[in-house]
Amino acid sequence: MIGPRPLYRAAALVIAMMAASAALASSAMTRSEACAIIDNRGVNPLSGIWRIGGDGATVAILPVAASSTRFDIYLIDSPDMSVIPGNKIGSAVSTGETGTFDAEMISGQGFTEKRMRYIMTLGQDGRLSFRSYKKGKKISLWRFIPYLFRFSVRNVDTRPESVDGAIKIYPDCQPSGPTLL
């Protein structure tokens, strides 16, 4: 028979998990809230609402209140139905190079969650480009089998690095005056 203490602990754990999920569900970011934060925290070239070119997802990159070099990334809208809109999906920090940011974003949710790292570069034309990179250690245990795996199989990817990017849709970065051709 199970004593009363383990049951109380299990009940407390379930209640705490339900409260945490309710708190996360209520803090979803909307487009209007993101626009209000962008308008109130001043002009920054990175902060805004961006449309990612590949899949058409819309993200809001918002400055953190107490810092001028840190940004939070929220998913506003996505064609992928497995991701809940309004959730924080990443963060970015300024680097030593002007217009370059180090970002970490999460793709998927739950058991399929995968963290990916990017270098985001803000171009002269106002577009944001992403270059992915990996950080950590990698060990190939296949190399310990002496003659069977002497030649390794490697993946080849010839896709250019800087074709993934985003276009700013709020605040509008179009020139206010006429454009001379």
Image (cartoon, grey):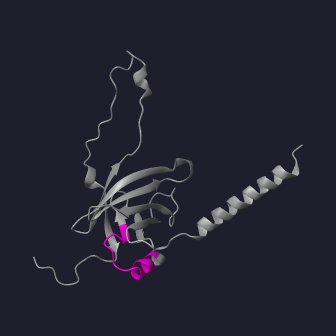
**Height in image: 155 above or below 59?**
above
**Residue 140, position as x, y percentages in the image:** 41, 29
Q: Residue at point 36% right, 54% down?
A: 118
Q: Is residue 43 magenta?
A: yes
The residue nearer to you, when weighing 153 against 79, is 153
Q: Residue at point 31% right, 77% down?
A: 172
Quadrant housing the N terminus: top right
Q: Residue at point 38% right, 72% down?
A: 68
**Residue 180, position as x, y percentages in the image:** 11, 79
Q: Is residue 31 magenta?
A: no
Q: Residue at point 26% right, 69% down?
A: 126
Determine whether, in the image, residue 80 is placed left or right of residue 52: right
Quarter of image, res 58: bottom left
Quadrant housing the C terminus: bottom left
**Height in image: 112 above or below 56?**
above
Give the magenta-colored segment's residue range. 34-50
Determine whether, in the image, residue 51 is placed left or right of residue 66: left
The residue nearer to you, when weighing 39 against 67, is 67
**Residue 67, position as x, y percentages in the image:** 42, 71
Quarter of image, res 70: bottom left
